Amino acid sequence: MPTEKDYKTIEKATIYDLRRIFVNSGKESYTLEELCRLLDTIADAKDQE
């Protein structure tokens, strides 16, 4: 069973993954709809792992 520290590490890794996606996209800003679609795509990809 994961510990609280494990969950914190996972949260930080997820935030870092999102940061990399946003920075590497080349876009300066996103609409709410674009962010939601992007997060849905990421969640769907994680379900496939």
Image (cartoon, helix red, strand yellow):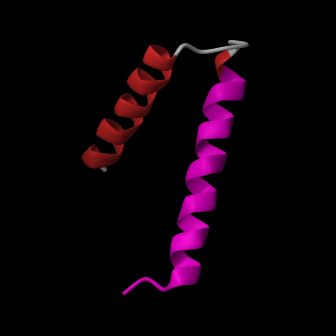
Where in the figure is residue 37, as x and y percent of width and height? 39, 22
Asked whether 39 or 24 is in front, the reply is: 39
Confirm whether the magenta stretch covers residue 19.
yes
Looking at the image, how many numbered discs can be counted on the residues? 0
Image quadrant in which you'd find residue 24: top right
Viewer-side residue, 8 vs 13:
8
Specify the quadrant of the image occupied by residue 45. Answer: top left
Q: Which residues are magenta?
A: 1-24
Taking the view exactly as shown, the residue that stands out farthest to the front is 32
Q: Residue at x 43, y 83 (%)?
A: 2
Taking the image as shown, residue 45 lies to the left or right of residue 18, namely left
Identity of the residue drawn at 26% across and 44% down: 48
Residue in view at x 54 percent, y 78 percent: 6
Residue depicted at 54% across the width and 64% down the height: 10
Q: Position of residue 36 (x, y in %)?
A: 42, 25
- Percent x, y for residue 5? 59, 81
What kind of secondary structure does the magenta stretch mostly adopt? helix
Residue 43 location, x and y as percent?
A: 35, 41
